[in-house]
Amino acid sequence: KKVLIIMKSLLFVVVIATLLSVTTAIHFNHKSNPYGATPTLNISKCPASIPTPQDDWSKFLSNSSIPHLTLSSGSRLPRQLTHIFLCWTPSRLYVKYQLEDNNVLSHFPSSSCNNPVWDYSATEFFITPEGAQHQTIHKYTEIDVSPNGALFVSRISNPNGNCRGFTGNEQQCRATGIETWGGNVLGGYGAYVSIPWVFIDGIQSEGGVENPRQAVYRGNFFRVDTPRGSVAEYSAWSPTFFSPPCFHVPAVFGYIHLNGY
């Protein structure tokens, strides 16, 4: 009987320890971020001649970029790197992804709208005018692009700040004014998205004025990738520290500054 009691006690301790470890993994947030505060990105104004989607943007905007992503768990760099270049004009925000990839997975036609592109290779961008003054973020826009330029775009409402209970209002792609491109390049693929500020800000332009309404936005960049012979990897500019992966964690959104605003 004593042996049985001891074994039951040990089993209880193991179960409690397991539950605690799972709870810790699930509830990681930006306060436990080993890299410190959420990141900041300074975006330059676009050159007078804006690079085409097919151009190598490193020749034009090397100082207005994110040189690599980190696994969304925060544990290490992904196996295949992602370089993101950005610039802005009074009417639009431009984002160009240059991605290493030995196993490009693209299923949906380039003209398709709001299919689950994240089930294959995809880039994802979340952005919001909320939170520039460190307020809690509950609403943001999700803009995902496949390797051939298929678009998914949705207005997200996230009262819990994680992947439990958020809702999305999918937008008619053409009505947003968003332009995309995707195509294979040597060693991987490129993806591009051009977004009107009036859509990001969620307001109608007045008197033809389309300027962004503020100098600082909050957002995050993600990638879904499956290297050849490996499992899927989920990477982020600002890691979310959730396991299993969860991108919808606005508390870790970085600060996006528009230089020259």
Image (cartoon, helix red, strand yellow):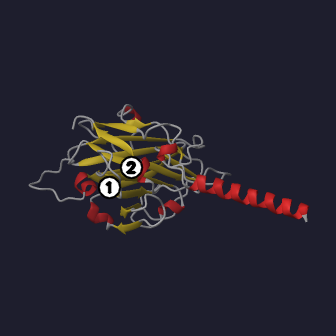
Q: Earlier in the sequence, mark 1 or mark 2?
A: 1
Screen quadrant of the N terminus: bottom right
- Three-letter amino acid code at the position of disc 2: Tyr
Image position of 73 (left or right of 123) = right
Would residue 191 be seen by someone viewing this image from the given angle? no
Task: Determine which residue is flagged by label 1.
Answer: 179
Q: Are marks 1 and 2 in contact (CB under 8 Å)?
A: yes
Screen quadrant of the C terminus: top left
Q: Nearer the viewer, residue 38 or 8?
A: 8
Taking the spot 39% from the left edge, 53% from the top edge, the residue there is 126
Q: Nearer the viewer, residue 196 or 53?
A: 196
- Three-letter amino acid code at the position of disc 1: Glu
Would residue 132 be seen by someone viewing this image from the given angle? yes
Task: Determine which residue is flagged by label 2.
Answer: 192
* 226 lies above or below 99: below
Q: Quick one: SS at disc 1? A: strand
Residue 2, picture quadrant: bottom right
Q: What x and y, as percent, mark residue 140?
A: 34, 57
Q: What x and y, as percent, mark residue 163?
A: 48, 61
Number of numbered discs overlaid on the protein picture:
2
Q: Quick one: SS at disc 2? A: strand
